[in-house]
Amino acid sequence: MSRTITAGTATTPERREAARKRAVDEGIEMRQVRSTDLWVASSGSNPAAAYVVKIVDGQVISCTCKAGEMGTYCKHRAAWELMREVGA
């Protein structure tokens, strides 16, 4: 089994794919904070919540959601990567 290390936490291909699916299924939206490396991600489970995703040199460095703070590959990271893949 292959693994990618993300902030000290092993991310399996299965975990990554599950996060990507959740990002799509929950309609996670991403918006860049004007001229910064910060993005705001909507919550898929709480319409009143949002999370800050930090991007440096085209890589997600952190997310303020519970999973992201634990170093886990989260659906907000997945949403940013999916958005980038489609060129949005």
Image (spheres, rainbow, N blue to C red):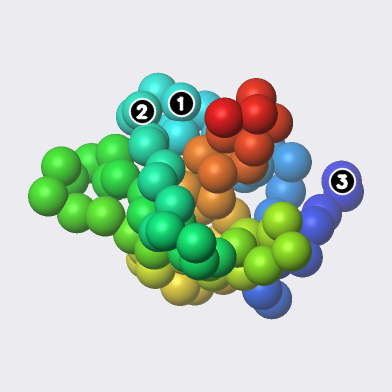
Please name the residue that numbered disc 1 is placed on: 24
User: How far, Cα to Cα, is label 2 from label 1?
Assistant: 5 Å
- Secondary structure under badge 2? loop
Q: Give the vertical position of 61 relative to 42 (above or below).
A: below
Instruction: Determine the CA span between mark 1 and mark 3.
Output: 25 Å
Residue under circle 3?
1
- Relative to residue 82, is residue 22 drawn left or right? left
Residue extending farthest to the bottom is: 8
Q: Give the labeled residue for mark 2.
A: 27
Front tag of 1 and 3: 1
Disc nearer the start of the sequence (3/2): 3
Residue 82 appears in which quarter of the rendering? top right
Give the amino acid type for the residue marked by disc 3 in the picture. Met
**CB under 8 Å between callouts 2 and 1?**
yes
Q: Residue furthest left?
A: 48
Q: Are marks 3 and 2 in contact (CB under 8 Å)?
A: no
What's the distance in space between the residues labelled 3 and 2, CA to CA? 29 Å
Residue 7, position as x, y percentages in the image: 66, 73
